[in-house]
Amino acid sequence: MEVETFFAKMERVTGTVEAGYVQNTDFYDDINAKLSVLKTRAEASTKNQKTIEQIELLQKSIKDLELLHKGRGDEGLSSPILSTSHTAIQVSIGAIIKLEKAKQRGDKSPDN
């Protein structure tokens, strides 16, 4: 949910001071910490390599977004960058959810 809130905010404030990187570092710190904890929890379980890989891909997408945002500084993220990044992150989150739901159903997954 935090990711969706971030993207909605960035769309709303594009072109304003609020869209700048420095004004949004708390989001990156928070989401990176939460993903790190999630990865650690996934690593604590056996046969969880696919989930770990999916979390790592999501971490990379967030890190790439942060680097783009930082590079643009006070200018913030443009609408095309927001759209592309949002889609990529949604796909990563969706893949993790699908994998975890499949595990709950007992479906065979690459981790088993």
Image: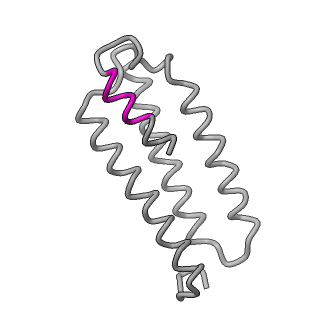
Rendered image quadrant of residue 30? top right
The image shows residue 55, relative to residue 75, as above or below, that is below
- Residue 12 among those drawn in magenta: yes
* Residue visible at 32% across and 25% down in the picture: 12
* Residue visible at 76% across and 66% down in the picture: 44
The image shows residue 21, relative to residue 52, as above or below, that is above
The image shows residue 112, relative to residue 92, as above or below, that is below
Q: Where's the C terminus, which quadrant?
A: bottom right
* Residue visible at 58% across and 26% down in the picture: 26
Q: Main secondary structure of the magenta part?
A: helix
The image shows residue 9, relative to residue 36, as above or below, that is above
Rendered image quadrant of residue 92? bottom left
Please tell me how many numbered marks the rendered image carries.
Answer: 0
**Direction from residue 7 to residue 109 in the image, left or right:** right
Where in the figure is residue 100, as x and y percent of width and height? 56, 71
Where in the figure is residue 2, as x and y percent of width and height? 51, 40
Magenta segment range?
A: 6-13
Where in the figure is residue 64, as x and y percent of width and height? 43, 40
Rendered image quadrant of residue 71? top left
* Residue visible at 33% across and 27% down in the picture: 77
